[in-house]
Amino acid sequence: MDTDYQDITRPNDLESYWMPFTANRAFKKNPRMLVEAEGMHYTTADGRRILDGTAGLWCVNAGHRREKIVKAIQKQAEKLDYAPSFQMGHPLSFELASRLTTMLPGYDRVFFTGGGSESVDTALKIAIAYHRVRGEGTRTRLIGRERGYHGVGFGGISVGGIVSNRKFFGSLLPGVDHLPHTHSPENQAFTRGQPEWGGHLADELERLVTLHDASNIAAVIVEPVAGSTGVLIPPKGYLQKLRSICDKHGILLIFDEVITGFGRLGSSFATEHFGVKPDLITTAKGLTNGCVPMGAVFAKQGIYDTFMDNAPEGTIELFHGYTYSGHPLAAAAGLATLDVYKEEGLFERAAELAPYWEDAVHSLKGVGPVIDLRNLGIIAGIELEGIPGKPTARAMEAFGKAYEKGLLIRTTGDIIALSPPLILEKSHIDEMFGTLGDVLKTLH
């Protein structure tokens, strides 16, 4: 029997959707609905334009509703909507992988995933399996970092270090340890770019090696710039020291570049920006400009060959993958996105705007409850003094007031994070920080 679902579904029923990382009850009492987007702006259900200060969720690096990307997705959907990636393939996934490896010399293989969380779990699994096929199967321990964010898979939250993301979910993966985070307000407050203080904290990895022995450690994973925890900039020399210690002890180094990849720092990736080459790089977000979910793991030369050389011909070398690995629509979106980045010079644009952005960020010093300002590339962290007994309240007040004034910001704890699309103009920067300055002056 045919059923008219419009008869039994309330089109504006907000209760059915269990929203992610959201105060569901508060949102549903006062919903903020976005119904359209273009360029630097969203449009709300009540017709207001909202300046996007966060590139969606750190992902819309080329701006919203870009015609070239939209048309590429449409064209692909009309031609090949889906193709399996297990023992089968389609041309675009191979083309995209090839394009990506040309962006990063020294990385010759790409493994596709459905997003950042899957990229992290993939990299962790590759690291453990890599040591096993080399005959060092005792190397299973993983080392993350306090205040790190690596998605929401069990692997990602195990190596991650954000308390609220971990505390509800039991013991998580065994054999995981954490480095200390690098943020020290008393030594780093109001630093422009990389702090001078803190490089020595990488030496904590030597302590963990002494504790567990290198023969038991598979990999270290860090965000080059920690984003979701509130924009923590790596101290000078810190990442270089981690690389050196990992090399010394035969440990793989993984950079989580889900946020920093694809131009956010004014370079293609953080590995290029800092001059440090990890063994594996996790990406997502800006890979497809947020248009179709997709992630990718870059592998340094030699890792793939190790798997190929240690498995009999004709057998599966890595027992891992996803239904949507290299999805045709995502691959089409990725290729078009890379075209836009290149044709418009958006990474170079970010680098050119970074000094103007930095000055705008630090213009907020002394405004309202601001206790620290941090920046690198086109990223900013604005830390607010919290209200005793009410953590996050002040930042959430800023979030609500900014939205009412036509600006979308992101908050974590009592920290405001900004990461707008890389197509922004100086006028957008002026508007963004002008609005935010006005909001900060009114906070309780």
Image (cartoon, helix red, strand yellow):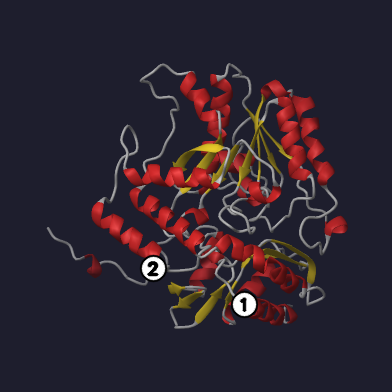
| Residue beneath disc 1 | 402
Tell me how far mark 1 sits from mark 2, CA to CA.
29 Å
**Residue at image coords 76%, 31%:** 208
* SS under mark 1: helix
Q: Position of residue 22 (x, y in %)?
A: 54, 62
Q: Dot 2 surroundings within 10 Å: few (below 14), some, or many (20 or more)?
A: few
Q: Is residue 212 left or right of residue 52?
A: right
Q: Which residue is mark 2?
A: 67
Q: Amino acid at mark 2?
A: Glu
Residue drawn at point x = 61 percent, y = 59 percent? 264
Query: Can see residue 95?
Result: yes
x and y percentages locating residue 32 in the rendered image: 50, 74
Mark 1 surroundings within 10 Å by alpha-carbon count, few (fewer than 14), some (14 through 19), many (20 or more):
many
Mark positioned earlier in the residue sequence (1 or 2):
2
Q: Nearer the viewer, mark 1 or mark 2?
A: 2
Q: Is residue 413 left or right of residue 66?
A: right
Q: Which residue shows up at 59% across the image and 82% down it?
A: 405
> At numbered mark 2, what does the secondary structure look like: helix, strand or loop?
helix
Q: Position of residue 99 (x, y in %)?
A: 46, 47
Outermost residue toward the left? 1
Q: Is residue 102 above or below residue 398?
A: above
Q: Quadrant of the N terminus?
A: bottom left
Task: Name which residue type carries label 1.
Answer: Ala
Q: Is residue 437 left or right of residue 52?
A: right
Residue 118 is situated, as x and y percent measured from the top left of the image, at: 49, 43
Residue 22 visible in the current orientation: no
User: In terms of image quadrants, where is residue 429?
Assistant: bottom right
